[in-house]
Image (spheres, coloured by chain):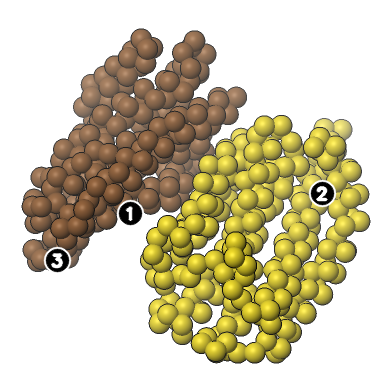
Chain colours: A yellow, B brown
Amino acid sequence: MQRFANPARFMRLSAALLPWCGLLAGICLIMGFYLALFVVPPDYQQGEAVRIMFVHVPSAWLATMVYAVMGSASAVALVWRHPLADIAAQSAAPLGAGFTALCLFTGSLWGEPMWGTWWQWDARLTSVAVLLFLYLGYLALIHAFDDPGRGARAGALLAVIGLINLPIIKFSVDWWRTLHQKASVLRLSGSTIDGTMLWPLLIMALGFTLFFVTLLLVRMRSALMAAKIRALRLAEIEAG
Amino acid sequence: MTAFATLLRRDLRLALGQGGDAASVLAFFVLAVILFPLGLGPEPLLLARIAAGILWVTALLAALLSLDQIFLADYQDGSLEALAVMPAALETQILAKVLAHWLVTGLPLTLLAPLLAFMLHLDHAAYGTLILGMALGTPALSLIGAMGASLTLGARRGGVLISLLVLPLYIPVLIFGTAGVEAAIAGLPVRPHLLLLAALTAAALPLCPPAAAAALRQALE
């Protein structure tokens, strides 16, 4: 763990990884969008609207996964005072908020023709809306202190507390009788989605994940560079 | 245990002695509830239908407004640092402060709720559930709120920030609190809702004080 605390090593490693991640993310997303928009047949019930699912489902997965990444990075930062973990959590937060907003937006677009409503106060939708507010609260908290270190530690604590919402989101469709359907891809008895739709969905999910990793690396690298520039400026001023 | 009792007595005396803070939270609760009949019109059927929601939401906001009482004064005058170096565990002291907060906000809100429910024409069958639900749920509000209050100590615009952090975590209490009253009005069993409220408080009791203690230690660093 501490091996990766060295920013110089991280910069070298991420510089090598970044082009590959970006390239693979681009290939997956282009392929996924092509399959989802042109190749996949219309659903027998949902018709053409099923294509919204190929954006909605991966962004919902990412919304929760990014929070898990943020929460675990925050825990690492709290326990080991790992400097890169703080930067990782702070860089992931706006991306997670973006995926959550995209998930709510596409879900709303799909819900209007399918359920006949843009929004329903069921447990899954409400808990995802709470997730968005957890992201926003975290972002507000880390910028609310004059001392950035204090903001980072308070934010890390909040991110760990907010992890309690993830199982609630996941199991909300099982615990309550919701309008939102239950899990259909990850279940013990195997997926209930036909292969012609499952494969494009998985390719999109992979593309979304790689896209997130690419953006996370870019944001972490620029945060590190900004810190370095600030340190150099300060040194320049002190030298007179 | 003596440290717990001493701190509890001190906080209660501070909250009640000045006569200001505790009473103004209750005044806010009453005033905010009164705004609804004035804003919506005094239609008894409509008011009876939404009484549970009005009472719970307003109680939530009243509890939220009073959260900075828990730590802010002690943080500003430095007594929090003295508390942190005392031999008693910080978690225990936080529990004492949370209990003091609940005694001057949550408990009076619970006792006032039936009076306001009467003014809102709430169905008589639901009074017991409302009082019991608030008695079971408001401790969770104080516990979760203490966590938010300790996280935002020393922050700019702490008041707005604390509501952004705490309100999403208050949602479960609101949902089960109002669902219980609705069930009582409809003649359905209220036990599951009350048990869930009790479960929320029971889960917050061991989880929130350590989290608040961790946040306080960071604020005092």
Q: Earlier in the sequence, mark 3 or mark 1?
A: 3
Q: Which residue is mark 3?
A: B46
Query: Which residue is painted at 55% across and 25% down in the image?
Result: B217
Q: Percent x, y for residue A154?
A: 57, 38
Please, what is the three-letter code of the amino acid marked with disc 1? Ile
The residue tagged with tag 3: helix, strand or loop? helix
For disc 1, the neighbor class at 10 Å (few under 14, some 14 to 19, many from 20) is: some
Marks 3/1: CA distance? Answer: 20 Å
Q: Which residue is mark 1?
A: B175
Q: Chain of mark 3?
A: B
Report the front residue among B182 and A131.
Answer: B182
Residue type indicated by callout 3: Leu
Q: Are marks 1 and 2 on the same chain?
A: no
Residue A21: x %, y % from top left: 83, 63
Q: Chain of mark 2?
A: A
What whole-number distance in Å separates the C-alpha atoms at marks 3 and 2?
Answer: 59 Å
Q: Is residue A100 left or right of residue B41?
A: right
Badge 1: chain ID: B
Q: Position of residue A200 (x, y in %)?
A: 71, 77
